[in-house]
Amino acid sequence: MTEQEDLPKIMASIAVTVPALAWKVGWAYLKAKKQRQRNAKYLTKGMVDGGMPPEIAHHLSEEFEAELSLRSLAGIFGSAVSRRPG
């Protein structure tokens, strides 16, 4: 088969795979973001209970929460994919 003959098959497999991948990544990102928000609350509370001024504790927990990005999530997926048995 030539490359031209393979093109429709390749495009069909991409058309099927991309939406599923987008859903998986989007869903994982939303779950991770929600978990970060919860953890930021616990982090703030723990720092304030430990004696840190509330303004500083809130600022640090906001930075912790904002650190999550799609790029960092892709790194998590990449390491999970590389650990899968072949």
Image (cartoon, rainbow, N blue to C red):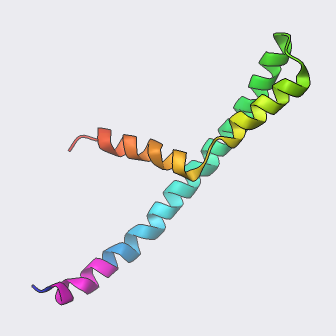
Depth order, front residue of 26/66 = 66
Magenta highlight: main SS: helix
Residue 81 against residue 11 in the figure, above or below: above
Residue 4 in magenta? yes
Residue 5 against residue 35 in the figure, above or below: below
Magenta residues, start to end:
3-11
Residue 27 against residue 85 in the figure, above or below: below
Q: Residue furthest bottom?
A: 4
Is 62 left, or right, of 4 in this rendering? right
Residue 35: percent from left, percent from top: 66, 37
Residue 5 in magenta? yes
- Residue in the picture at 45% in, 45% down: 75
Residue 22 against residue 42 in the figure, above or below: below
Residue 61: percent from left, percent from top: 76, 31
Is 52 left, or right, of 6 in this rendering? right
Depth order, front residue of 29/63 = 63
Picture quarter with the N terminus: bottom left
The quarter holding residue 53 reads top right
Query: How many marks are shown on the rendered structure?
Result: 0
Residue 14: percent from left, percent from top: 36, 73
